Amino acid sequence: MDIFEDMFDESEALVNVDQKTGRQLSQLVRNLRNIEKEIEDAETHLKSLKAEKHRLSVENIPALMDEMGVERLDVDGVVVERKMIVSASIPVDRKEEAFAWLRSNGLDDIIKNDVTCSFGKGEDNIAGDVVGLLQERGFDPQTKTHVHPSTLKAFVKERVTDGKPIDLDLFGAFISNAAQIRRKA
């Protein structure tokens, strides 16, 4: 019996749908699906172009310049130079070893210590006391009071959904409706 009730409820919702609006909705959904596909194709193409650019700029051209024994040359009105690219990231399991090496070589000035302490609801006074203590000892603690973006978004959504008052401008909030199409699993 529930199936018949659901069908009845849905048929009531379709009372205001005529052939023209049904066609309009179908066309808009097709347009959205086409745009989503175009964006997906463009992103795939862009990823491929970036990979090819990387291969040419980091592998092929420098290798050929090495073979030619040149550091710089002009080609088709542009200057091509070899440039050193450096990336670095201390492996987590070697962090202490790397820091020890820096310290033993007098290079420990690049090691930074950030001290962060989170305080919960109702602990504003304790946070103020800790900052005061650090300042008394000659430190200049950097404090940051914030609401995490995901928490703020959930808060605004909950207020709006529950019909509770909220100043959207005050929280930099914007509410809109969007169509989302998913593929069947």
Image (tube, helix red, strand yellow):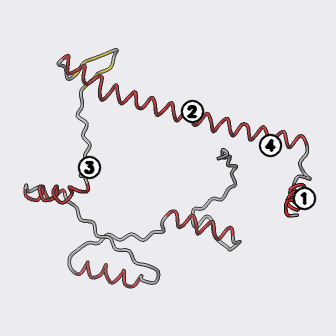
Find residue 114 and report its horizontal and vertical position in percent.
27, 66
Which mark is first along the chain, 1 or 3?
Answer: 1
Q: What element carries label 3?
A: loop
Q: Do the residues labelled 3 and 1 touch (CB within 8 Å)?
A: no
- Circle 3 residue: 89
- Residue 8's label in the rendered image is 1
Q: In this view, does 111 lie above or below 24?
A: below
Spatial CA span between label 3 and label 4 = 51 Å
Give the CA separation, mark 3 to mark 1: 62 Å
- Foreground disc of the pair 1, 2: 1
Position above or below: 8 against 26: below
Q: Mark 2 highlights which residue?
A: 41
The amino acid type found where label 3 is placed reads Ser
From mark 1 to mark 2, how far is it between C-alphas? 41 Å
Residue, disc 4: 25
7 up-or-down from 85: above or below: below
Q: Is mark 2 on a helix, strand or loop?
A: helix
Q: Estimate how packed mark 1 is, as few (under 14), some (14 to 19) or many (20 or more) residues with alpha carbons within 10 Å.
A: few
Residue shown at 70% from the left, 54% from the top: 177
> Disc 4 residue type?
Leu
Q: Is residue 145 left or right of residue 96?
A: right
167 and 146: which is toward the camera: 146
Q: Marks 2/4: CA distance?
A: 24 Å
Of marks 3 and 2, which one's residue comes earlier in the chain?
A: 2
Where is residue 80 drawn, in percent x and y?
Answer: 28, 22
The label nearer to you, 1 versus 4, is: 1
Corner quadrant of residue 98: bottom left
- Report the amino acid beneath label 2: Asp
Q: Which amino acid does label 1 sit on?
A: Phe
The residue lying at 84 percent from left, 39 percent from top is 23
The quarter of the rendered structure image containing the N terminus is bottom right
